Amino acid sequence: MTRAAVPGLPSRHPIGALLPALYADDDLAQRFTAGLDTVLAPILSTLDNLPSYFDPALTPPDFLHWLSTWLGVDLDDDWPEELSRTVVARAMELHRRRGTRRGLEERLRLCLGVEAQIIDGGGATWSNTPNATLPPPPTGELLVRVRGPVDTRQVLEVVQASCPVHLTCRVEIVTGEPDEEGN
């Protein structure tokens, strides 16, 4: 789609009709302003429909990628258009949950259509017993197990984009049926 000159697009506000009465019958003035109308009609049409450009469900496909940059969303060129629109529409929700287990699960489900088991190596513990033994130190690793035939590169890209900076990320692709523990 383009917002350049569109053949036959009428202007909602023709300039020739706005000229003083002296120029209403002037053929040169009317042809000149008709040429300006042809150039300005796509601009006026875009401005008349401007709110639609900021709605991910309605924006033109070529504008969707630019709109995603406003929201800090990286769209994959291989994604279908509907998935890209959904990711842009849910960008704020995904940003609020970024860095959390739930946020990573949701992003993997949305972007790749996979369910993931996430084992978080960081965290904090507490005890209401004084002088209790300390817990083991955190592993500092985020393990993401994904079941099914998926592209490891795509999973790793999504995980690295959502993983907290203080953790290292590891992805395991698991095939077969889950065992009793869900692994």
Image: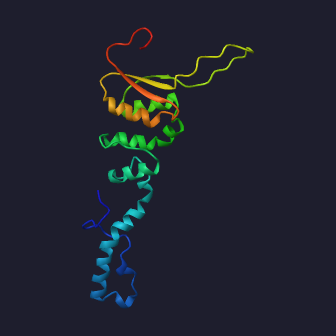
Which is more toward the observer, 30 or 148? Answer: 148
Task: Write the residue at 51% across / 28% down.
Answer: 101
Residue 55 in view, yes or no: no
Image position of 38 with respect to 19: above or below: above
Q: How many marks?
A: 0
Residue drawn at (62%, 16%), measured in percent from left and top?
135
Residue reaching furthest to the top: 180
Q: Residue at x 37, y 42 (%)?
A: 84
**Which residue is outermost to the right?**
130
Query: Residue 1: image x %, image y %?
Result: 29, 56
The vertical placement of 148 against 161, above or below, is: above
Q: Does residue 31 lie above or below 166 as drawn?
A: below
Extreme-left residue of the structure: 7
List x then y, in percent, for residue 59.
38, 52
In the image, taking residue 2 as reference, residue 46 lies left or right, namely right
The quadrant in which residue 32 appears is bottom left
Taking the image as drawn, is residue 97 in sight? yes
Please tell me whether residue 164 is drawn above or below residue 10 in the rendered image.
Answer: above
In the image, 102 versus 151, the foreground residue is 151
In front of the other: 155 or 180: 155
